[in-house]
Amino acid sequence: MRLVFVLALVATALVAPICFAQDLSISKVGAEDCGGSAGDASSSTPCGSGLIIYTVTVTNNGPLPAANVTIQDALPGSVLFGSVISQFQWSCTSPPHRGTGTVTCTRATLLPGESRLIAYTVLIPLGYPQHVPLVNTATVSATTPDPDPANNSSTSTLAVHLLAHTPTLGEAAIMALALALGAIGFLILQRR
């Protein structure tokens, strides 16, 4: 009888941490913002905007609530932070606009079966090497035990296609240039 009791205690000690925990998972997707419709930046027809929207979704697969949930995303040093555009029920700190650093978002609890997302933008500066993949990883953690840490990070890899920036002139500049060229032409004709 004593042996059965000891075996039951050992089995409970081994199984309890798994049964009385939450299983968080995270998914991170990056896409180029092409003027209102985010498309895949690795597409064969990129718009070259230099603006990437990241969407990070955290899910609690249960069976218990997750406490003190934290998302962290250390942005690559080659990109500049834009802004947090969606953070429903998250409290986020981030680098300043056009700064570098880590985006950190927290919430007190995430219930079993619940999913919540945040979205933010980063800017690809001119001069970023063409066709060099932009690799960025976000992680999630909580103060409650998680028996499956393998799904607590997610990486987005995007091919970057910046279109060459061609300077353009406004209407006033074009008129001024036309007047200046006309005046130069008039002076050349007067000297003949």
Image (cartoon, rainbow, N blue to C red):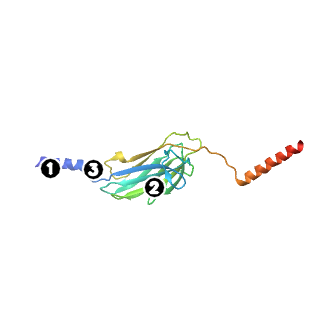
Question: Of residues 115 and 141, which is closer to you in this image?
Answer: 115
Residue 127 picture quarter: top right
Residue 155 placement (x, y as % from top left): 43, 45
| Residue occupying image coordinates x 36% and y 58% | 114
| Residue occupying image coordinates x 86% and y 45% | 187
N-term-proximal mark, 2 vs 3: 3
Residue underneath mark 2: 118
| Residue occupying image coordinates x 71% and y 54% | 171
Report the disc number at residue 63: none
Distance from Cα at disc 1 to Cα at disc 3 = 21 Å
Residue 116 picture quarter: bottom left
Residue 8 placement (x, y as % from top left): 17, 49
Residue underneath mark 3: 18
In the image, farthest residue toward the left: 1
Question: Of residues 118 and 39, which is closer to you in this image?
Answer: 39
N-term-proximal mark, 1 vs 3: 1
Identified by mark 3, the residue type is Ile
